[in-house]
Amino acid sequence: MIRVLTFLLSLLLPAVTWAQTYPALYDVSGVAADDVLNVRDAPAASGKVVGTLAPGATDIEVIRVQGNWAQVNTNERSGWASLSFLARQSGQSDDALTGQVSCFGTEPFWGMSIHPDGAQFEWIGEAPITFDSYQSVATPGVLGKFARLYTGRSRTGALLLASTRLCSDGMSDRTYGLAADLTIFPFIGQPTHYTGCCTLAPN
């Protein structure tokens, strides 16, 4: 009977894993204090070790899952760590723009830090723009897309659309799970569009 239940659970667990939303934050769990969690170049125990996570490491961003392996970033590159030693943090929303999020891009370099009460946009050589309010924008029929419309005191607006798809910053071998399309609407002048990636991991 136990073997039958184990077999049934093995069939159900992949479905439960894929039903969860990614990217998401995890903590290293079950690793001895004198050991590390290996990060490999492939989702298999035979993969080459390309990095490690400390036994007490927290806020590890899992980009996606393949079987019992989680794609994470370490040492300026992407790799795979065993899900058996990663515990998903509780209280995470299906809305990827909830909580602390950092979005960024190159050519030109730009960054947008998002927090529960607003956001701040920075563009190289220019003064930061602070947005102190936002509202969610409906994306009916489109799965894995999250939109926010931000407004600032200077009557500058921003529309941020984050899509749950793999994204590269173009400067490293890291992989991110959110692609960003950002449009800034100045009080005077034409809108400016930026593309880049977003991460849930704290800076």
Image (cartoon, helix red, strand yellow):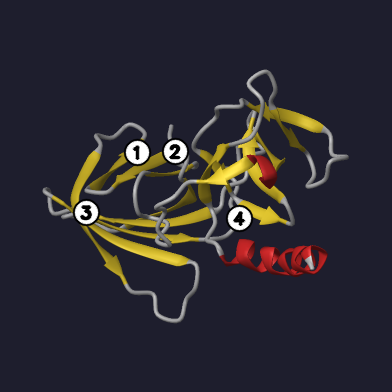
Question: Quadrant of the image for the N terminus?
Answer: bottom right
State yes or no: discs 2 and 1 in contact (Cβ < 8 Å): yes
Residue labelled with disc 1: 123
Mark 3 belongs to which amino acid?
Pro
State yes or no: discs 3 and 1 in contact (Cβ < 8 Å): no
Q: Earlier in the sequence, mark 2 or mark 1?
A: 2
Mark 2 belongs to which amino acid?
Phe
Mark 4 belongs to which amino acid?
Leu
The image shows residue 173 at horizontal and vertical percentages of 67, 38
Judged left or right of residue 138, residue 33 is right
Q: Earlier in the sequence, mark 1 or mark 4?
A: 1
Mark 4 lies on a secondary structure that is loop
Q: Nearer the viewer, mark 4 or mark 3?
A: 4
| Quarter-of-image position of residue 126 | top left
Mark 1 belongs to which amino acid?
Trp
Residue labelled with disc 4: 166
Question: Quadrant of the image for the C terminus?
Answer: top left
The image shows residue 28 at horizontal and vertical percentages of 59, 35
Name the residue rendered at 36%, 34% in the picture.
124
Residue labelled with disc 2: 109
Alpha carbon of mark 4 to alpha carbon of mark 2: how far? 20 Å
The image shows residue 165 at horizontal and vertical percentages of 57, 60
Farthest bottom residue in view: 141
Up-down: is 97 above or below 75?
Answer: below
Alpha carbon of mark 4 to alpha carbon of mark 3: how far? 30 Å
